[in-house]
Image: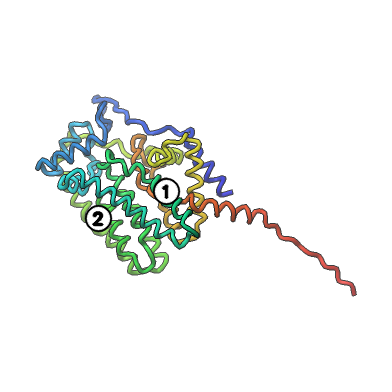
């Protein structure tokens, strides 16, 4: 039954509209919308900012001017990305940045292969799981997307999740903090991990996750102040984040943010539903955490992502397809449980 529920929910993507550009209602309105003019894309925006910082200009001055020229909003402050990724990319040669992203993705794949090894019997299932991780990270491995913040934050979240073990949480917290410092929405993942640690009575781990959130809060406050210094009353204001696009929209975004983009939507939806079922079927603490993280980001995207926020799904896709490795066993167990009817034997006792 749960398997059918997953499939039905994911198939709603067939009737869900795909990513669409925001609509600018024009300068006559009292609300400034953040639709860039034709030809201006987020990739070009981030590329221009990195080039400006590489040329010696301060990050916030470059970001404000670039977003202003491209008709992007500067308000509220989180309409401007944290400077972490742009400053690092500006300080390094482009080829080294691409190699770092490749190393991050390969490290994420290897970490999950190591995490799955005790659960797999034989090299073939383990190899399949590794290939599924490669397929899920195919978009992240595209060099043209290197300036997208989610392309980095998503693998960092996946790597953090793979490395976390009871009593060994410091690397997981470090990578979780790194993800937050690149993309603010990684806070949702770190908060979930803190709640799990608290429920399980892992006091030190809970303090570790909360400490990471505290560091992030300080950085975010400094970021808000810096943005306020370069923005003015005439700068555009974001139209807000209340898309209410539904779960099918998340499935469509997850499709185009992974190797499933080569499949027709109905087939990709079935694959995603099966993968989610596989995560549910895997009886392990990391699977429970992963499933909650997927559900939380799916809810975030379903409720708040606008039609042009297609890249939000990259926060969840790096290991989403790995659940397929456990789906077969889950289906077999489900069928076995459904066909297991208890037989009642009646014994006549003659006195």
- Which image quadrant: the C terminus? bottom right
Which residue appears at 42% of the width and 45% of the height?
A: 298
Which residue appears at 43% of the width and 58% of the height?
A: 116
Image side of residue 64 versus residue 37, left or right: left
Quick one: label 1, few (<14), some, or many (20+) residues within 10 Å? some
Do we see residue 58 in this rendering? yes
Image side of residue 12 versus residue 191, left or right: right
**Residue 271 location, x and y as percent?**
49, 43
Residue identified by numbered label 2: 217
Image side of residue 281 versus residue 175, left or right: right
Q: Which one is closest to the eye, mark 1 or mark 2?
A: 1
Please tell me in which quadrant of the rendered image residue 308 appears: top left
**Residue 258 location, x and y as percent?**
39, 42
Quick one: label 2, few (<14), some, or many (20+) residues within 10 Å? some
Please tell me in which quadrant of the rendered image residue 203 appears: bottom left
Residue 216 vs 260, above or below: the answer is below
Tell me the number on the disc at residue 250.
Answer: none
**Residue 93 location, x and y as percent?**
17, 45
* Mark 1–mark 2 CB contact (< 8 Å): no
Mark 1–mark 2 distance (CA, rounded to whole Å)? 37 Å
Which residue appears at 21% of the width and 31% of the height?
A: 70
Image side of residue 7 versus residue 101, left or right: right
Front-most of residues 175 and 304 = 175
Residue identified by numbered label 1: 131
Residue 222 vs 207, above or below: the answer is above
Q: In the displayed image of the protein, which residue is found farthest to the right?
A: 351
User: Number of numbered discs present?
Assistant: 2
- The secondary structure type at the circle numbered 1 is helix
- The secondary structure type at the circle numbered 2 is helix
**Residue 342 location, x and y as percent?**
71, 60
Residue 335 vs 34, above or below: the answer is below
Mark 1 or mark 2, earlier in chain: 1
């Amino acid at each position: 039954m749960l398997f059918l529920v997953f499939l039905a929910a994911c198939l709603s993507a067939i009737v869900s509209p795909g990513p669409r550009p925001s609509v600018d209602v024009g300068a006559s309105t009292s609300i400034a919308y953040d639709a860039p003019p034709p030809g201006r894309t987020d990739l070009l925006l981030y590329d221009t900012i990195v080039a400006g910082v590489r040329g010696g200009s301060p990050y916030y001055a470059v970001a404000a001017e670039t977003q202003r020229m491209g008709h992007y909003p500067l308000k509220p402050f989180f309409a401007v990305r944290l400077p972490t990724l742009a400053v690092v990319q500006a300080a390094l040669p482009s080829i080294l940045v691409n190699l770092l992203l490749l190393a991050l993705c390969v490290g994420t794949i290897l970490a999950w292969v190591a995490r799955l090894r005790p659960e797999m019997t034989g090299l073939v299932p383990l190899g399949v799981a590794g290939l599924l991780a490669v397929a899920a990270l195919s978009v992240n491995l595209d060099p043209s997307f290197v300036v997208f913040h989610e392309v980095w934050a998503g693998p960092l979240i996946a790597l953090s999740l793979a490395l976390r073990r009871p009593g060994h949480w410091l690397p997981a917290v470090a990578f979780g903090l790194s993800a937050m410092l690149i993309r603010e929405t990684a806070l949702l993942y770190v908060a979930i991990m803190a709640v799990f640690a608290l429920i399980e009575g892992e006091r030190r781990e809970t303090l570790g996750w909360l400490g990471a959130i505290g560091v992030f809060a300080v950085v975010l406050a400094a970021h808000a102040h810096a943005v306020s210094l370069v923005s003015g009353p005439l700068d555009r204001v974001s139209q807000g984040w209340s898309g209410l696009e539904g779960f099918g929209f998340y499935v469509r975004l997850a499709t185009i943010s992974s190797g499933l983009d080569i499949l027709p939507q109905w087939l990709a939806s079935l694959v995603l539903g099966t993968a989610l079922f596989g995560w549910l079927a895997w009886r392990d603490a990391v699977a429970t955490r992963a499933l909650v993280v997927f559900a939380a980001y799916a809810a975030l995207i379903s409720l708040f992502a606008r039609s042009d926020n297609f890249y939000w799904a990259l926060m969840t896709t790096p290991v989403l397809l790995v659940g397929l490795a456990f789906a077969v066993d889950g289906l077999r167990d489900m069928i076995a449980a459904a066909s297991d009817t208890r037989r009642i034997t009646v014994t006549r006792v003659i006195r």
